[in-house]
Amino acid sequence: MDAAGAEALCRCIAEWVATKLRWNLTADETEAAALQEAAAGCPDQRMTWELAA
């Protein structure tokens, strides 16, 4: 994967996780493991979120 593709993937993962956190959604074991594995390749990715009211 080229650098632009890797950056886009890392951003997508961060946005997915931030959305789950914002809305207090859960992830099953399979999803959590996949997200952790994918995010391991994104050491510099940062994310922010606010809890939904």
Image (cartoon, grey):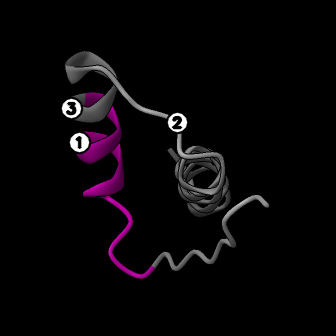
Please tell me which of labels 2 and 1 falls first in the chain: 2
Q: What element carries label 2?
A: loop
Q: Where is the C terminus found, in terms of image quarters?
A: bottom right
The numbered disc on residue 37 is 1
The residue labelled by disc 3 is: 33
Label 2 and label 1: CA atoms lie apart by: 19 Å
Mark 2 or mark 3: which is in front?
A: 2
For badge 3, the amino acid type reads Ala
| Image location (x, y in percent) of residue 39 | 35, 54
Mark 3 or mark 1: which is in front?
A: 3
Residue located 62% across and 77% down the image? 48
- Classify residue 15 by image quadrant: bottom right
Tell me: 3 left or right of 30: right
Mark 2 or mark 1: which is in front?
A: 2
Label 3 and label 1: CA atoms lie apart by: 6 Å
| Image location (x, y in percent) of residue 10 | 53, 57
* Crowd tier of the residue under label 1, counting other residues whose Cα lies within 10 Å: few below 14, some 14–19, many 20 or above: few
Q: Do the residues labelled 2 and 3 touch (CB within 8 Å)?
A: no
| Magenta segment | 34-44
Question: Camera-side residue: 24 or 48?
Answer: 24
Tell me: 30 left or right of 10: left
| Image location (x, y in percent) of residue 4 | 67, 60
Label 2 and label 3: CA atoms lie apart by: 16 Å
For badge 2, the amino acid type reads Leu
Q: What element carries label 1?
A: helix
The residue labelled by disc 2 is: 25
Q: Do the residues labelled 2 and 1 touch (CB within 8 Å)?
A: no
